[in-house]
Amino acid sequence: MTAYKSTPDPIEQNRARWDDVVDIHVNSSFYRVAEFRRGETSLDPLVLSEIGDVAGQKLLHLQCHFGLDTLSLARLGAHVTGLDFSGKAIAAARALAAETDIAARFVEGRVEQAPGLAGTDFDIVFTSWGVLVWLPDLTLWAQTVAKCLKPGGRFYLAEGHPVTWIFEDRKDTYRENLNVVRSYFLDGPQHWDDPRDYAEPSVSLNHHTSNEWQHTLGEVVTALAQAGLRIDFLHEHDKLVWPAIPGMERKDRFFEAPEGAPRLPVAYSISARKV
């Protein structure tokens, strides 16, 4: 993966890349779509254990991609709306909802457009796994979450821990990759040119460029608090749904450090409530 120096519009470049991967992801075993079609949930055990009872709740899923988790939440009884900036992903989500006969609403738009496009009276706003790096402005993001929630409504986030960004990612073993090679504190987008897709690495994408923003854990919590959300919990976890540090070993739905290796916080989750 090679960094480059400039980009005309980082958000539009990201959108083009995400449009490019929709069909790949719908057909990839990584997302377990076949299992979902057979009635299984796409939600991992961590999210299921922490999000709480969603039955009868009006729920907004931000950055929903092609709607797999959104529809899994609908199967749990939530009245769901999914929002994503990729029109191709939204079309795939609507098609999957129709195919599986699950009631759901999907809208196309950027996160900050959610109040106008989706509404402002949700019981729950949900988002998870690999979402915040695509957002340049966490203050705007947190304010959007707050606007979409009704008073007393709750927000839930599960995300990869930003500390994983600092480590080496090209060595053969987990312990070798614990070498620190990047700063935890970064300003501005990190620009990348990489034709590989994380779900199907053998596939070469048409749109190679992507732009990511590193946000510290402190920035996430502060943005939510300043937007008027009361933090109910912040949990850190030693397992993650992708191998953030190469050499992590898969155990069921998660990747963890090998037996006997140092356990690090590779994921975190936050529950907050609008006061």
Image: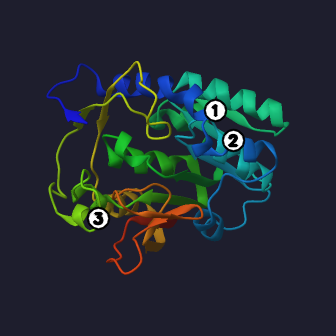
> Sequence-wise, which precedes: disc 3 or disc 2?
2
Q: Nearer the viewer, residue 263 or 235?
A: 263
**Contact between labelled residues 2 and 1, with CB atoms less than 8 Å apart:** yes
- Quadrant including the N terminus: top left
The local crowd at label 1, few if under 14, some if 14 to 19, many if 20 or more residues have their Cα within 10 Å, is: few
User: Measured from the top left, where is residue 100 in percent x and y?
Assistant: 82, 37
Please, what is the three-letter code of the amino acid marked with disc 1?
Asn
- Image location (x, y in percent) of residue 87: 56, 22
Q: How dense is the environment of label 3, judged by Cα within 10 Å: few (below 14), some, or many (20 and up)?
A: few
Q: Amino acid at mark 2?
A: Val
Q: Is residue 169 left or right of residue 13?
A: left
* Whether residue 79 is visible: no
Q: Point out which mark residue 218 bears.
A: 3
Please state which amino acid type lies under the numbered disc 3.
Answer: Gly
For residue 167, above or below residue 256? above
User: Mark 3 and 1 residues: CB-CB less than 8 Å, in contact?
Assistant: no
Circle 2 sits in a helix, a strand or a loop, which is it?
helix
**Can you identify the residue that label 1 sits on?**
27
Q: Is residue 67 left or right of residue 22?
A: right
- Gap between marks 1 and 2, in whole Å? 7 Å
In the foreground, 191 or 38: 38
- Residue 43 position by quadrant: bottom right
Residue drawn where x is 81% and y is 30% of the image:
98
Mark seen at residue 33: 2
